[in-house]
Amino acid sequence: MSSKTLLLEDEPATRAWFEARLAECPRVHLVASCGTLAAARRAIASFAPELLILDLNLPDGSAIELIREAQLCARVPEIMVVSVFGDEKSVLGAIEAGAQSYILKDANAEDMRRAIDQLLDGGAPISASIAGHVLRRFRASASALGAAPIESLSERELQTLKLIARGMSYEEVGEALALRYHTIASYVKQIYRKLEVHSRMQAVERARGIGLIDRN
Amino acid sequence: MLIYPNTWVARTRARLDASAMSWKSLVRICIPVLSTWWMVWAFAPLQPHGLTAGTALTLKSVTKMPVRSDGSRASAELRPGDSIQMEARFDWPSLHGRAPVLEIARISGNFELRLNDFLVTRKVPNSPWLMARERHSRYLLGEGLLKPSDNRLLFTFYGGRFETSIELEELKLRASGQDDFSGADGRDVFALFNAAGAATLAALLFGIFLQRRKDLEYLYFATGMLAWGAYNFIFALDVYVLSPMLTQLMLHSALAIFVWGMSLFARRYCAERNPSRERLVNYLTVSSILLLTLAILLLKDSQIYRWPMTLHRLVLALIGLDMSLVFLRYCWRVRAPASDLLTGAQIGALSLGVHDALHFGIGLDLGYRALIGFGLPVPLFIFGYILAQRFTQSLAHAETLNRDLDQRVQEKSAELEGAYAERAQLIKAQTLGAERERLMRDVHDGVGGQLVSLLAQADRGQLQADNVRDALDASLLDLRFIIDSLDEVGSDPLIALGMFRQRVQAQMLRAGLQARFDTHSLPEGLALPPETLLQCFRILQEAIQNTIKHARAGRVTIAASCAENELAISVCDDGVGGAKAQGGRGLRNMVARAQQIGAGLAITSDSGGTCVRLTLALAPR
């Protein structure tokens, strides 16, 4: 069973490279390949894709907007963002908007296939840097609110994040915590989900704070 | 900004300010007018007056002495050692429980007065040289001693040192509390005025106290004034309506409380707090009141409780004297118009006190019985004025201070904000400049070098796909190091090494190297600056590259540890060794980079493998 997939990448060469890679993935059925946000919006409306693979910086804006809009779809698609450096700025912002996965632009076909499988199987990738940032976000909000936020991290999720921040792979974390690879991967996806909910709550709080939303 | 924007003081002041007359000028006018009025009252000669309604008593001589008597008037000449007795008899049907007041228009000579053998009063000076002289007198005759009929009043006159004449004029008997009796010479009206003035002053001071609860002196003054008002009120009301003993007790207790309050006020006002002296004043006041109460309640004979009364007066006089001295010392110390006023008031009060002491203490007849009661309003109202003035002044002073402070704070904060903004701008510019320079150097150093070298190869036509790929890989990796080194969480070496590990993992896997990372002993929360981090990444990367290229190793261990503010990172392989610090360009580069960030670099290489050990001083946390 393959998932309807939409690719959004403005640079033709890279797009072609991605198209070729995606053609090799048996679980991906590429239904549209776009170069602009506007085209992607139309494609999402007409195809209702189940998987979005997005470059973030596009000629007509940032794909973060598109990720937010996608959260309002009847069936929320899985979202994977393409990043050159896998750094905090691009990836974490996308995750907070609702993305669950990211892939480096120079990934080879094997990496690509593995990442897509992981995402469709309910997992998500993470790097030491992102783990460090996620930890920091949750700690900061916990200390700011004086208590754990509603969607706070579980003990296991916290342990996972700490080990990943040390550069451990899922396999190593699984070994250390006596958990299966897939469990760890799904933990990470849950963590991303919480981060998104958390950032949305914070946005609501901020809006209340400046009076955009009535307290009642 | 007003400190007490809504207080009645502020409102009153505002109203006064609005009218032409200011608060101060009002007080300035009132004080001399009132004082003069009071002094006139106090020292005005007594008006001769006809006695008011009542039953005139007829006097009869008891002793066989030559007494000129016409019933309402009696006079006689007494030789030293002689004594003479005159009596008057009267009936006293029950008059709603009122006791009779005996009013005597004029009486002179040493005498004692008894009602039904109970001693009412005794006017015999302690000094044989002096003669008691009474003019207009009135005595309450205790109701418990009265019979419905045939009560006997007995006057006994004693001769002095020399031949003396005695006189007794017009005895009248009336029920106590009878209105027309009071006001005979205006003193009772005067006392009422005093009471009203004292109550007003007490209320004013109490109001001030409510505004400044820290300053207990206002409360003490208010209490003293209230007591003094009560004293005057009792006096004015002719409250012989009450039992005479109770009246005496109330009068003297009120006086004691007044002196006590004023004494404590004086010490606080003059900043001469002396806890032991204050305790002594408290004890003396309380015990004196208690003693007097016991004496009056237990000893029915006024002749006997005269001594406790004298003792009580003495105690009060001492406390009052102490208070006066405190004030005078203060006025001497603080030379100000207010203290001159206070000095005058004190000297006035003291001279009145001396008069009363002479009069009561040694029986020197100086005319009026007690002047201090009449003279006291002047100093008291001066006190009141000074206190109110001080309060309004401190209010105004505080307002000025507040305004000044507000202004200064505003000026200062504006200044600081300006300076801060300027400084922040400067720091930002400096930081940005330094960071920009560093980034340029970093990019030039790593990616720039790689690309230039590629370009040169392309120019010479030596470009090979493998070389290009390797060079591009290395460039990309270096760019990622640069990005990672700028990552905020990367300042923690623990996470930074995790990031590094993920960056180089694939490379080592491709080269068939088994890598082990050992960072377990590293604590969380250390911090390294970005440039240090980047150079560390590059040194470690270089070390790993060397291992891949030259060591022919199967395994590499990257370990980090931290001890005594020193971070040590080592890359050790199990290869063939043979690396020298002075050797290839790569190693020289590593050493140079380590020097740049002030780190130590030790390379050991033997047949067991090569170990690169980087040591970094951590800023103490």
Image (spheres, rainbow, N blue to C red):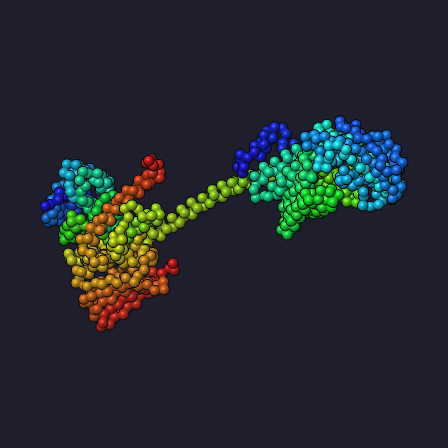
Q: Nearer the viewer, residue B212 or B321?
A: B321
User: Residue drawn at (10%, 46%), measured in percent from left and top?
Assistant: A1
B382 lies left or right of B467: right
Look at the picture and state if B81 lies above or below A158: above
B43 lies left or right of B475: right
Q: Nearer the viewer, residue A88 or A153?
A: A153
**Is residue A165 among what the camera can see?**
no
A44 lies left or right of B37: left
Tell me which corner region of the image, top left, top right, bottom left or bottom right, holds residue A203: top left
Q: Position of residue B558 (x, y in %)?
A: 25, 63
Q: Position of residue B135 (x, y in %)?
A: 80, 35
Q: Position of residue B554 (x, y in %)?
A: 18, 66
Tell me which corner region of the image, top left, top right, bottom left or bottom right, holds residue A168: bottom left
Look at the picture and state if B493 lies above or below A195: below
User: Residue drawn at (53%, 34%), measured in percent from left and top?
Assistant: B6
The C terminus of chain B sits in image quarter: bottom left
